[in-house]
């Protein structure tokens, strides 16, 4: 939020936490707090944004994939799940220090129009439920085939 206060760019903050009231007092008019957003509205917000800012640390990196599924790039802190789901220069960009200066720098230097929505959506589909089910089914078939051939399961 402080980075967007400095840049005077619009920012919509989704969700709420224990610091929400304090942060709202610090926010300039370019920042809007939306609180909890239902899934159907969230999808619309992703589709209408220029980019999704992902400054936190999440085990899987689901938020970047949701943004990519909507055809939007991500500006993410380079840690944890974001490193697994964001492809630098293709589906988003990273900042490497979790501070206002680093985020403001990458936001001001990133041309979000350089990202191809089709490429972003295709990338997100690799993590879809259907793709996961296909992968798991193939994994089980391969292990079953090895078991039938050898009479025992190899180490997975």
Image: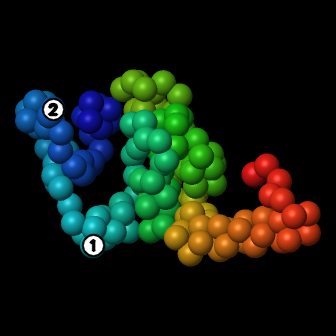
Q: Position of residue 154 (x, y in %)?
A: 83, 53
Q: On the image, numbered disc 2 is attached to which residue?
A: 19
Q: Is residue 113 visible?
A: yes
Q: Are marks 2 and 1 in contact (CB under 8 Å)?
A: no
Left or right, 6 with respect to 144, comes to: left
The single residue placed furthest to the front in the displayed view is 151
Q: Is mark 1 on a helix, strand or loop?
A: helix
Work out whether residue 55 or residue 154 is closer to the camera in this orientation and state it.
154
Alpha carbon separation for disc pair 2 and 1: 26 Å
Looking at the image, residue 151 lies above or below residue 86: below
Left or right, 1 with respect to 130, comes to: left
Q: In which quarter of the image is the N terminus?
A: top left
Q: Earlier in the sequence, mark 2 or mark 1?
A: 2
Work out whether residue 149 or residue 138 is closer to the camera in this orientation and state it.
149
Q: Position of residue 129 (x, y in %)?
A: 52, 70
Looking at the image, residue 101 lies above or below residue 15: above
Locate residue 142: give its quadrant.
Answer: bottom right
Q: On the image, numbered disc 1 is attached to which residue?
A: 40
* Res. 13 mark: none
Q: Is mark 2 on a helix, strand or loop?
A: loop
Q: Where is residue 147 in the image (x, y as percent from the top left)?
A: 83, 65
Locate residue 46: give its quadrant.
Answer: bottom left
Q: Is residue 118 visible?
A: no
């Amino acid at each position: 939020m402080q980075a967007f206060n400095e840049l005077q760019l619009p920012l919509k903050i989704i969700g709420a936490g224990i610091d929400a009231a304090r942060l709202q007092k610090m926010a300039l008019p370019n920042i809007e707090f939306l609180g909890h957003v239902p899934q159907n509205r969230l999808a619309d917000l992703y589709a209408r944004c220029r980019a999704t800012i992902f400054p936190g640390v999440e085990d899987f990196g689901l938020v970047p994939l949701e943004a990519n599924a909507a055809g939007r790039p991500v500006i993410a802190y380079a840690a944890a799940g974001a490193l697994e789901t964001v492809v630098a220069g293709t589906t988003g960009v990273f900042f490497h220090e979790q501070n206002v200066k680093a985020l403001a720098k990458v936001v001001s230097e990133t041309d979000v129009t350089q990202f191809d929505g089709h490429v972003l959506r295709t990338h997100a589909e690799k993590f879809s439920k259907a793709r996961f089910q296909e992968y798991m089914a193939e994994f089980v078939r391969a292990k079953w085939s090895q078991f039938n051939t050898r009479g025992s399961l190899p180490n997975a």
